Image (cartoon, rainbow, N blue to C red):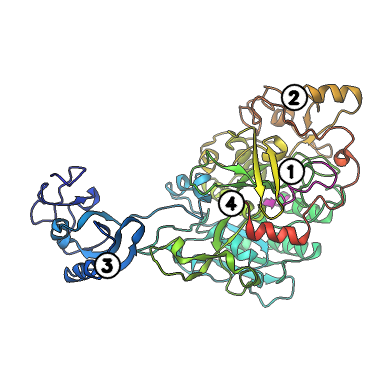
Amino acid sequence: MNRILAGVAIFIGFGTVSLAQTAYVARELQNLDPQSHVNVIVRFKHAPDFAHHQMIRDLGGTVRGTLDLIQAGTYSVPAATLQSLAYNPEVLSISPDRPVHMLLDNTTAAVNAPAAWSTGLDGTGIGVAVIDSGISDHDDLQGSAGSRVVYRESFVGSDGTDGFGHGEHVAGILAANGADSNCGICTRHFVGLAPNVKLIDLQVLDSNGVGTDSGVIAAITRAIQLQSLYNIRVINLSLGRPVYESYALDPLCLAVESAWKAGIVVVVAAGNGGRDNPAGNNGYGTITAPGNDPYVITVGAMKSMGTPQRTDDLIASYSSKGPTQIDHVVKPDLVAPGNLVVSLLSPNGTLSTQFPQDLVPISYYEQTSQPDLSTSYFTLSGTSMAAPAVSGAAALLLQANPALTPDQVKYKLMRTAYKSFPKTSTAYDPASGQSYTSEYDVFTVGAGYLDIQAALADTSTPRNSALSPTAHYIPGLLGGILGLLGLNEATLNCNSTTVCSPTLFGTQSIWGDQAIASDQSIWGDQSIWGDQSIWGDQSIWGDQSIWGDQSISGTASTDPVEAMRIMTQGEQ
């Protein structure tokens, strides 16, 4: 019986293995140098035991682990022994121990980062300021000249380490090179979006994850001061607070605008208040500051659904929705993976001691049957985890074209975003027993899902501002009629305090079947809301306070207990 199912003969410099007498041998094992060693997975007729392992040792190999689920063992064997191993009647098949690239738990695959890496883009030369709780000298943040954390400063009086664990995780999504998950028996390789950027660690959150506006503003100031020294082109702000006044008056918003105007792309988490409903607004109007500012790129969170492809990905129900309080700016601008993301573990963070269930088993990324927990990786969720994916994408764009302005980076990322979504999705929260239905409108997913490959391929060169537009509500009977027809708004306009070219956002209605603007629209050439009204079945029109002049108390962020639960448990 021919047991080489693919019709493979292996050539190792000493002859051809007989088709009739051997097990199935993978094609990659042909033409190997007989003096080399190769890591292989050997499947047996029965779960491997001591006798099977000893057989490998007798051939000069070593045992690396067992995979009882598929009745196999993992071994390092001399290539010259593959022929005799294939002849063993107990052996069913021999395959190379191939790397499985799920890459930061599917984050980078979902946004097409490998396409950028294949062209040599990795963030080299770009500085990114991470304004958070701190970053350590983790193995995954090393470079050819040592640590890629090139500057550290604390604005909360800490000792320079990440006493919380949030900043370390954010930095890994942005910049990890996967050193601690790059091994002979590793099955997942946790690589960040821009694995060779320089990191500027500006610490504004203490060991409880709490900071102040003044601390954040001081850190933004320092980033601007250090801009030329470290080529700081991006600031990541995976933090926020409720909106209390117009962005035109908010000191935090003014600070991020200053950085933007200085030539630094500012990326901000949208917030995790998408489930909040004290005013009956179904989570709309919950974008936090400074994500409410029309200059910055505000990022919501998607769920990767445990797969590398993006076609099955869904919005996280906790991801905050627009329009923003008071100013009614259309936010978020983009969405990116942010749920149940595996990234770097801080050696000093309180999160890992308080929530040990989020420590990653080593068996999650290595072929081992041991129950040990990783000392390198940790799982967190939220829009805080989505923002650094966009920061990494911005770094790649700027490496490819250093002349891009912050507005041009924002334009390209939004214009080319992936726009194929379902009409709705529902998530169930076992802790509360509640179900949450999300609609894929512009206030939930913005311009769409981050797509790095498409952004890099975009050849347009916009010259105008990329301020996020504002939504205008038409009250009264006319507004009610338009709302029923899915037409209420009239238009999205650029921010009233600045001059914004109508060719950027256009003057067409965002409702119905028309695209939001002309071919130069940041929204791309297709509608992102499909065949239904942007508002869907959960209208936010009428008398709801979202359109008032004051922010809704409590809806711009979840309560501390709920916020911590979302961050450490995510959403299934």
The residue that appears at 55% across and 40% down in the rendered structure is 455
Nearest the viewer among 266 and 426 is 426
Nearest the viewer among 271 and 415 is 271
Return the disc, 2 or 3, that comes first in the chain's sequence.
3
Do the CB atoms of the residues marked 1 and 3 lie less than 8 Å apart? no
Return the disc, 4 or 1, that comes first in the chain's sequence.
1
Q: Mark 4 = which residue?
A: 389
Instruction: Say above or below: 566 vs 309.
Output: below
- Report how far apart the C-alphas of labels 4 and 1 lie in the structure: 19 Å
Return the disc, 1 or 3, that comes first in the chain's sequence.
3
The residue that appears at 64% across and 35% down in the rendered structure is 462
Amino acid under label 2? Ser
- Report how far apart the C-alphas of labels 4 and 2 lie in the structure: 31 Å
Instruction: Say above or below: 80 vs 8.
Output: below
- Res 509 label: 2
Do the CB atoms of the residues marked 2 and 3 lie less than 8 Å apart? no
Of badges 1 and 3, nearer the viewer stands 3
- Res 321 label: 1
Do the CB atoms of the residues marked 2 and 1 lie less than 8 Å apart? no
Predominant SS of the magenta segment: loop
- Tell me which segment is drawn in magenta: 261-281
Classed neighbour count for the residue bearing mark 3: other residues with Cα under 10 Å, few (<14), some (14–19), many (≥20): some
Amino acid under label 3? Asp
Check residue 273 for magenta coloring.
yes
Percent from the top left, x then y, of residue 502?
74, 28
Of badges 4 and 1, nearer the viewer stands 1
